[in-house]
Image (cartoon, grey):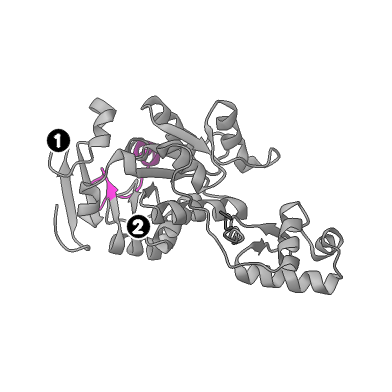
Amino acid sequence: MSGPPGDIWRVGRGGDGYPPALLDLDEDAPIALYGRGNADLVRRLTKAETLTIVGSRRPSSYGLEVAEELGHLLGAAGLVIVSGMARGIDAAAHRGALAGGGSTVAVLGSGPDVVYPRSERGLYERIVASGAVVSEALPGTRPGRGCFPKRNRIMAALGAMTVVVEAAEPSGSLITAERAHKLGREVGAVPGRVTSRVARGTNGLLADGAAVIRDAQDVLDCLLGAGMTAVRPVGPSLEPELARVADAVEGGAATPDAVAVAGGLQAPEAAVALARLELLGYVRVDAAGRYARTSRRAPEPRREATTLNP
């Protein structure tokens, strides 16, 4: 299980470096894993420090942002992010982990040397360079019917928790969540709009008792206990006017005019404030020009020390 990142390596069931979490699949555990990239990362995988993130191949912009941020913050917090390198949520989770300097493993439905989808070749190469790709399929195997539902069991087994960001009904992501539940793993889901097709699966999971995942902190609370390391990103300090505008956006004001009304500003002032908040990372704007709050929070105000008189 050693060699340069470009080499293909193999580890057999029961052999050195075979992820022990996969043995929970019993007779359904892969006979072998073939991989490219950092073999030592796979050798060191432990269920407790591994998180699986899955979701729709056709997500909303909201879903992409959430997936990337979860990957970024939780990867930076030390968890290994596992996903399937599919378009959409999977790719966003991998990109987030890479951006945060964390570790990520892609479980492929094809052979470890076959990039699918081909549009994600750049991502594939980045994962091979700093993480790992693995598959139970022999090198050179093209993806075929049934290969993706089959690989889902590997993703479900590797992680202590599977988080579904967005999923329609039915979907492969729900198959992964169901398999994780049967293995006794934690299952979490990101809430979505009840009118959204890609949120039906996640909202259904929540109705069935899945953990509510609003941000990275919720994942850490589920895995490590409430009050563990805070991971919500902290931005620069905000002057009072910008803080009011950020609060207005968080309260639902999505356009400069609405922000002006909510914040007691002139429309040009609101537009300038929104632009500044976007540059600081406190708000984002979509293609329709509507603003929404990000998870970035302002630093806590400094408290002056008090002196007790004798």
Q: Amino acid at mark 2?
A: Val
Q: Which residue is mark 2?
A: 115
Can you see residue 300?
yes
Q: Amino acid at mark 1?
A: Gly
Residue drawn 52% across the image and 53% down it: 232
Q: Residue furthest front?
A: 310
Residues in magenta? Answer: 134-152
Q: Position of residue 245 (x, y in %)?
A: 75, 63
Q: Position of residue 48 (x, y in %)?
A: 32, 39
Mark 1 nearby-residue class (10 Å; few <14, some 14–19, many ≥20): few
Residue drawn 28% across the image and 55% down it: 132
Residue 269 placement, left or right of 90: right
Question: Could you say which disc has been placed on residue 14 in the image?
Answer: 1
Looking at the image, residue 44 lies above or below residue 259: above
Residue drawn 27% across the image and 56% down it: 113
Instruction: Give SS at disc 2.
Output: loop
Q: Position of residue 278 (x, y in %)?
A: 65, 68
- Where residue 3 sits, quadrant-wise, is bottom left
Q: Position of residue 116 (x, y in %)?
A: 38, 54
